[in-house]
Amino acid sequence: MKKIVLSALAVMAFGTLAQAEPLKIGVAAEPYPPFTAPDANGNWVGWEVDFMIAICAEAKLECVITPTAWDGIIPALTSGQIDVIMSSMSITAEREKTIDFSDKYYATPISMIANKGAVGSPDVAGLTGKILGIQVSTSQEAYAQKYFADAVAETKTYQTQDEVNQDLAAGRIDAMLMDALPGADFLKSEAGMACCELVGSVADDVEILGNGTGFGLRKGDPLKDTLNAAIKAIRDNGTYDAITKQYFDFDIYGAVN
């Protein structure tokens, strides 16, 4: 996958000096390729970074990436430490009790990835007696608690997806749940190819898995309309597709609502 290297300062260059302060875009500090990850020089790269640059340029906003721990990213938004969440966050009814969301900007199913031959199917039958790994405070964790808690021998939770990947590759867990798009990226990696296989996608549950991924915003923030207009504009003018083709060979937007 081709990755455009752009620093936070480059993001800010797309903005306008009319703002009193740059818009602080909260990104999970943990790498989440191919969406967000720091490169060898510490610059944030990935599909979501390029998407954000296009959105800020379209909306004439001055934006700066603000790395934030995933498990504290919603409190950071509601307390004003950041202004927007852009971190592959699913739009769910539970989260909408606390924050608002923009329109979706991509959608992905949840994949079950396992050690080769360890799990036969992405369901209760396949996971019975197995050890499942999950990143905390994710839709996958809520899904596992609802559907797999009584079937698995153990559910191990981790602060980052990288830690889950590493324990799966090392054989310390049997399977993990993660978004299908970064999951596919993991399976193409040297570690992923050596250890693991895609078992399949779990059955859908809109209440838990949500309606795609969107920007997270404070309740009632008028910025929501600005971001929605920018999302529509870059989808209409071809910018969205141009960015996506640099990372994926398929449509990641999902069904048009």
Image (cartoon, rainbow, N blue to C red):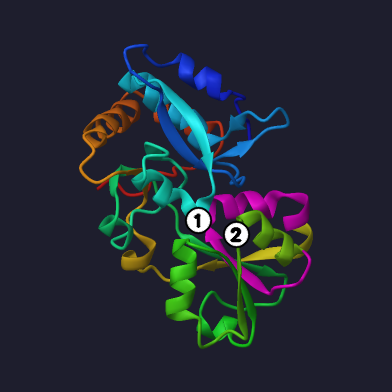
8 with respect to 109 (left or right): right
> Which residue lies under the disc numbered 2?
159
CB of mark 2 within 8 Å of CB of mark 1?
A: yes
Percent position (x, y) of residue 42? 67, 30
Q: Residues within 10 Å of mark 2 (few under 14, many from 20)?
A: some
> Which residue lies under the disc numbered 1?
71
Residue at coordinates 58% horizontally, 81% vertically from top-left?
127
* 186 drawn magenta: yes
Q: Type of residue at label 1?
A: Asp
Which of the two residues, 63 or 183, is positioned nearer the viewer here?
A: 63
* 200 drawn magenta: no
Residue 89 seen anywhere in this rendered image of the structure: no
Rounded to the nearest angstrom, the CA distance separating label 2 from label 1 is: 8 Å
Residue range (magenta): 170-192
Percent position (x, y) of residue 236? 30, 27
Percent position (x, y) of residue 2? 63, 31
84 with respect to 96 (left or right): right
What is the secondary structure assignment of the residue under circle 2?
loop
Q: Is residue 164 above or below residue 102?
A: below
**Chain-order first, disc 2 or disc 1:** 1
